[in-house]
Image (spheres, coloured by chain):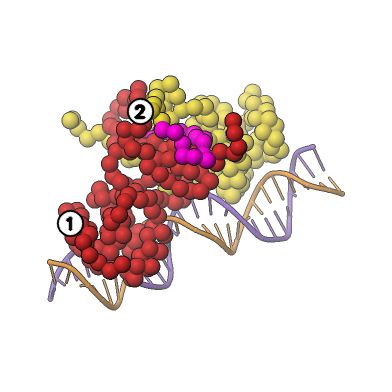
Chain colours: A red, B yellow, C purple, D orange
DNA sequence: GTGATTGCAAATCTTTTGCACTAAA
DNA sequence: TTTAGTGCAAAAGATTTGCAATCAC
């Protein structure tokens, strides 16, 4: 659990984003960007940080997630009012959201196609298209 | 501002949904379902109710919106964490969301096509597909 | 050193809840 | 009556903010 290869990786990301590499930011970056892509809430990340002996306050976790998102290192996914998920995968893709479990899962960008998109209203342009495929438990057959 | 034709309309909707037609529910239903489709927050609807001389508490507005949503009279649209919009249009359609103004606008169901939808994970089925086309102000040219 | 960052606790904001009161059937 | 619905104020979550202490450069 205590530091090795990917340390550099996290450091690079922070520096590339112009964020001063503090102990807290480095630790959180390592939790977020080591391993595979993930969807995480502030509360969850805070729990992981504490479990990994990284002393960091919940407020700092929130601030850091927002800074990372602003820097393009993370993407915020809104599926339920009153709760934010942060996605370490910032490439073009969409999501399954299981309403019964609260689980969020990626749909690769090329596995879903949005067509016939209407022109944006005057004075605006499209920033992003978010597709949420909402799932519910499949009770028995059909 | 004081009652005429669409009164019946609101009453029918409530009775059809098995909701007792109280003064507050009738008043809110009229504000919601008279006129064209709309996207509204609890806070906004409460403001409209007060402006229309309908004495109703914010708590009741929240409860009523949730009951209406449960009954299929409304649909909840989540675009920003920590704020819920309710859509009086419950037919199949999607949304533009202007991030600078917070404005939500319908995209008719047949003006946007989602294709190549992957199969839902085992044990689940698709409840709904939500597409949010996020807009930002178009600054000058290209 | 100096300004950016952090921690803490308090503040904010939206939404829900408990309970006595009121109104619909 | 009898039960569902309402209002109020308090509670509950999630997130943010103010400010003194701390850390990176």
Identify whether B97 is placed above or below A50: above
Q: Disc 2 is attached to a residue of which chain? A: A
Q: Quadrant of the N terminus of chain B?
A: top right
Locate residue B68 relative to residue A15 in the image: left or right: right
**For the residues marked 2 and 1, what is the alpha-carbon distance in whole angstroms?**
34 Å
Residue at 41% x, 59% y: name it.
Answer: A44
Identify whether B79 is placed above or below C3: above
> What residue sits right under mark 1 in the picture?
A12
Residue at 25% x, 66% y: name it.
Answer: A3
- Count of all numbered marks drawn on residues in the image: 2
Res. B139 visible in picture: yes
10 Å crowding of disc 2: few (<14), some (14-19), many (20+): some
> What residue sits right under mark 2 in the picture?
A114
Q: Position of residue B53 (x, y in %)?
A: 60, 40
Segment tinted magenta in the rendering: B118-133
Q: Quadrant of the C terminus of chain B?
A: top left
Q: Position of residue B141 (x, y in %)?
A: 18, 30
The reply to whether the magenta stretch includes residue A122 is no
Q: Position of residue B34 (x, y in %)?
A: 57, 28
Locate residue C14 relative to residue A58 in the image: left or right: right
Tell me the quarter of the picture where residue A109 sits: top left
Q: Position of residue A89 (x, y in %)?
A: 30, 46
Whichever of callouts 2 and 1 sits on the residue coming sooner in the sequence is 1
Q: Which mark is residue B54?
A: none
Secondary structure state at the residue bearing disc 2: strand
């Amino acid at each position: 659990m205590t530091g090795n290869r990917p340390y550099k990786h996290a450091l690079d990301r922070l520096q590339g984003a112009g964020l001063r590499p503090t102990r807290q930011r480095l630790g959180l970056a390592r939790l977020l960007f080591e391993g595979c892509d993930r969807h995480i809430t502030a509360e969850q990340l805070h729990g992981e940080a504490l479990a990994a002996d990284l002393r960091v306050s919940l407020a700092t976790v929130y601030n850091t997630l927002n800074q990372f998102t602003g820097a393009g290192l993370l993407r915020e996914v809104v599926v339920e009012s009153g709760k934010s998920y942060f996605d370490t995968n910032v490439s073009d893709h969409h999501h399954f959201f299981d309403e019964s479990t609260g689980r969020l899962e990626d749909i690769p960008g090329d596995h879903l196609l949005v067509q016939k998109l209407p022109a944006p209203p005057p004075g605006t342009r499209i920033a992003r298209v978010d597709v949420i495929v909402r799932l519910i438990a499949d009770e028995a057959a059909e």
